[in-house]
Image (cartoon, rainbow, N blue to C red):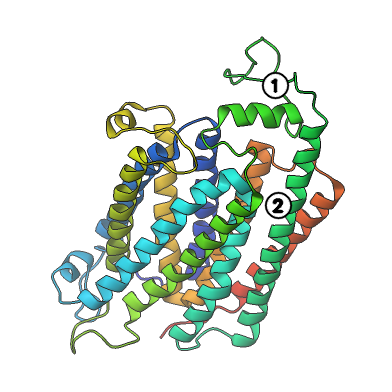
Amino acid sequence: MLLIESKGGAIACMLLSLLFLGTWPAVLAFLERRGRLPQHTYLDYSITNLLAAVIIALTLGQIGDSRPDMPNFITQLYQDNWPSVLFAMVGGIVLSIGNLSTQYAWALVGLSVVEVVSSSITVVIGTTLNYFLDDKINKADILFPGVACFLVAVILGSCVHSSNASDNKKKLGQLSSGCIVTSTDPEKGKDGMVEAAFGTAEFLIELENKRSIKVFNRSIWLGLVITFFAGACFSLFSPAFNLATNDQFHYLKKGVPHLVVYTAFFYFSVSCFVFAIVLNIIFLYRPILNLPKSSFKAYLADSNGRGWALLAGLLCGFGNGLQFMGGQAAGYAAADAVQALPLVSTFWAILLFGEYRKSSRRTYILLVSMLLMFMVAVGILMASSGHRK
């Protein structure tokens, strides 16, 4: 199998993972803003997310000869390693819950703030757990100042959202009641007028009319609560995967090799897939946040945006796989540097969705401060990389 053993190779995996993991949320948020039901989108996403794990396992996990202490993927499927498999599956379940939660939080709070806050919580809790699970191979005097920077980013992220919400409320308050836009055409409104400019009150109303999750008159705290819950879930999946691959509690029988990263990722993705499918089928018939009811038949017939949802699943699947490959080589605490994904997500949020356009000076200052703190934190975290023997 392909083994990533050098620090340089691990960092390359992290950087590529960062790009993928920062892009797929923007794709799902884009579909929600175009009116596609999140249940439909997440079902499509889950299929290719599992497919990515299968592809990685059958290619990278099967390259080269199998060794007794490092068996190939298929060889390891038949071994008695269920304690480690269960840890991997628990990691997949909490990741699935976190991803599902953020899908609703993006609409309520905004893509960039959700990603910053949830990723920062992931680092503050998850990186600390991984540091001790990894036998302290990362440099503590570098690692924990980076964790502190992530914590500051959480606070700044909450301030950004609060300030931006106030800006939007002020814009809507200045708009006369007769200016509601109900455009359905991507280029023109219903009356033939050009689509409203990013950041204007008319744009906010037009977006509300298009999107599947209605956000007007909802408390900002609901979105922040969902975001913090998602961050708590995300903080547990990497430590669970760490336990699956390194057996720190010595649950495996003597002579049974540890799960290789590809086998662990396969089981991780299977549990993520099964949990997501079951939960989203329930949400089809019993939706939350006042979404319209749907059905499995309606989901199968809804091909609008399906290609984008399938692409998002592949990006997330390969992104997670690369993160774990880098973590097994350089330490999972350092691999949490991929939580810099909000830097990528914020770029897409501003470019594609017009977030923070025409906002106040205070919001811009807070946004720039948040992103700068985030970049500092990520650089420090990568500098703490160690080397697993």
What percent of the width, then of the height, locates residue 191? Answer: 66, 10
Q: Label 2 is placed on what type of residue?
A: His
Please name the residue shown 36% across and 78% down the image. 243
What percent of the width, then of the height, locates residue 118? Answer: 57, 61
For marks 1 and 2, give the CA distance: 24 Å
Is tag 1's residue or tag 2's residue first in the polypeptide sequence? Answer: 2
**Number of disc labels:** 2
What percent of the width, then of the height, locates residue 347? Answer: 65, 47
Q: Quadrant of residue 155?
A: bottom right
Q: Is residue 174 left or right of residue 84?
A: right
Front-most of 39 and 218?
A: 218
Q: Residue furthest right?
A: 361
Residue 161's disc is 2
From this viewpoint, is residue 69 visible?
A: yes
Q: Quadrant of residue 134?
A: bottom left
Q: Quadrant of residue 75?
A: bottom left
Q: Is residue 258 above or below residue 284?
A: below
Front-most of 55 and 89?
A: 89
**In what quadrant of the picture does the N terminus appear?**
bottom left
Residue at which label 1 appears: 180
Q: Label 1 is placed on what type of residue?
A: Ile
Residue 240's disc is none
Secondary structure state at the residue bearing disc 2: helix
Tag 1 and tag 2, C-beta contact below 8 Å: no
What percent of the width, then of the height, locates residue 282? Answer: 32, 45
Please name the residue shown 44% across and 49% down the image. 315
Secondary structure state at the residue bearing disc 1: loop
